[in-house]
Amino acid sequence: MRPDFFLKFVFLFLALAFLSTLSSCKKDDESSQWTRCTNCSQEQISGKYAGVATLYEYNMESEQTGQTYSEEAYLEISPQGSGIRITVGVVNLYNASISAAWEDGNYTISSLSDGEFFASVWVRDNQIKITGINKRSSPDPDPEPDSSGFILRSLFDFEVVKTE
């Protein structure tokens, strides 16, 4: 009976030690979460980014005909006058060059050059991440009266983190 008591005691001790260790583990605090960068300057967001992207392609009936995922997405932002110049894509798959306005303190980028471009700027510690889309359309040869007159041809969805 004594050995059985000893085994129960050891098991209980190990279980309590394990639970104690789990409860004392440092949990992720809010500073490790991505938040919108409401005070990023043009200088801070300028540079090279790398990450992931998915290209969705559509036919003239706006039916999806292709989807390509890549872990080799790139984005580069450089100052251009009072705005910014953005190059985004995946080598040998997709490329877009966008001119956009930028004011320090913004956390979104939008432009209608080279399709429709919409992106959000995020920050965590000293890292900057940009997530967004670039949509390209072509004129609808036979538009419906209530349509925009354009057909979606491709949508490039990306998430990149600043590397330089």
Image (cartoon, rainbow, N blue to C red):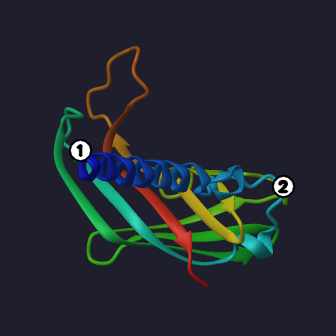
Q: Residue furthest bottom?
A: 164
Residue receiving disc 1 = 1
Query: Between residues 33 and 88, which one lies in front from this camera angle?
Result: 33
Q: Residue at x 73, y 75 (%)?
A: 80
Residue receiving disc 2 = 105
Q: Residue at x 28, y 66 (%)?
A: 70
Q: State the quadrant of the N terminus.
A: top left
Q: Secondary structure at mark 2?
A: loop
Label 2 crowd (10 A; few <14 / some 14-19 / many >=20): few
Could you tell me residue 127's position as x and y percent?
65, 70
Amino acid, disc 1: Met
Q: Check residue 56 in the rendering and tell me which mark sits there, or answer none.
A: none
Q: Residue furthest top?
A: 146
Q: Secondary structure at mark 1?
A: loop
Q: Residue at x 25, y 53 (%)?
A: 3
Could you tell me residue 73's position as x and y percent?
39, 70
Report which quarter residue 126 is drawn in: bottom right
Query: Between residues 45 and 64, which one lies in front from this camera angle?
Result: 45
Relative side of 153 to 50, left or right: left
Up-down: is 61 above or below 83?
above
Amino acid, disc 2: Gly
Label 1 crowd (10 A; few <14 / some 14-19 / many >=20): few
